[in-house]
Amino acid sequence: MKKREWVRLPSKWIEDGGLKQLQWTNSEASGSNNIAALMVLAPIAHHADDEGMAICTYDRLALATGLSRAKVSAGLTVLEKLQVIDRAPSGRSTFQLLNYNEAGGWSKLPARGLYGAGRIIGFEHFHLRTMNELHALKLYYLFARRRSNSTNMAHISYDKIEAYTGIARPRIRKGISFLASVGMVHVEHVPSRANERGTANAYRLPFIDPYVHLGTRGRDTDFALAE
């Protein structure tokens, strides 16, 4: 199946605080399983049909993410507990993205541009070893959820990021820096609502509407939406 530029990702669970449930606990295995869950979610969404059903083997998920089969399975278990997916609804190697057609409950997730030789290139830098990797992926999905169609960016303050993800405010910048360093987010500086002479950060995911950005549209008032 030819990959699309972007795919639909059910994301109301993010708005409802689902990301806060994915924590880096005292058990490293638990934290790494949560990272694996957010990694596996992407290729499932990329292979989903118009009803949110994906047919995807463990081997394909392992190739796309760079994870072992054991970690793929652990990540799927986390997603199932979060009620993000249903496993094997139509037999082996099938996954249903839950609430797929819920009005207002989905976001655009980059697809085709993320891949090289069947693997999501940015995931090559994730080794399931640090809290910052989990924070980075939580931020990635939050930015997808909060992305504005008009500006192609997520306009969200650190206070709101902390509220949605549970990431302590002092750790947010480090997670964003990690995403930027592996090419999974572009940080833009836009006019601030709070200070007419100031700027605020906004976050743009590569490979979604790539020609809609500050360089092509300029710093007009449409971009002054930061919280």
Image: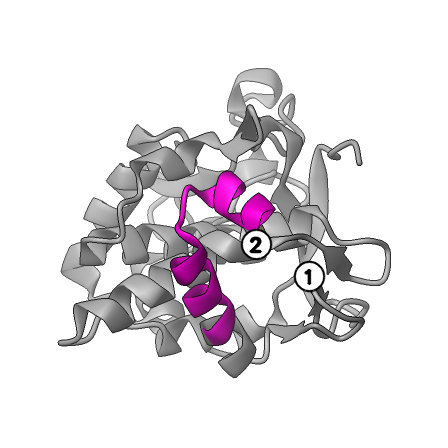
Q: CA distance from mark 2 to mark 1?
A: 7 Å
For the residues bearing labels 2 and 1, Cβ distance under 8 angstroms: yes
Residue 161 appears in the rendering: no
Residue at (73%, 34%) from the top-left corner?
Answer: 3
Element carrying mark 1: loop
Q: Amino acid at mark 1?
A: Ser
**Chain part drawn in magenta:** 59-77
Q: Is residue 136 left or right of residue 88?
A: left
Residue at (80%, 71%) from the top-left corner?
Answer: 90
Disc 1 marks which residue?
93
Position of residue 227 measured from the top left corner of the image (x, y, whole percent): 43, 56
Q: Amino acid at mark 2?
A: Tyr
Q: Is residue 161 left or right of residue 16?
A: left
The secondary structure that most of the magenta stretch takes on is helix
Position of residue 206 measured from the top left corner of the image (x, y, whole percent): 53, 31
Is residue 64 part of the magenta span, yes or no?
yes
In front of the other: 129 or 62: 62
Q: Is residue 15 above or below residue 172?
A: below
Residue 38 appears in the rendering: yes
Q: Is residue 65 left or right of residue 220?
A: left
Q: Is residue 179 above or below residue 18?
A: above
Position of residue 58 measured from the top left corner of the image (x, y, whole percent): 57, 54
Badge number at residue 58: 2
Q: Residues within 10 Å of mark 2 (few under 14, many from 20)?
A: some
Element carrying mark 2: helix
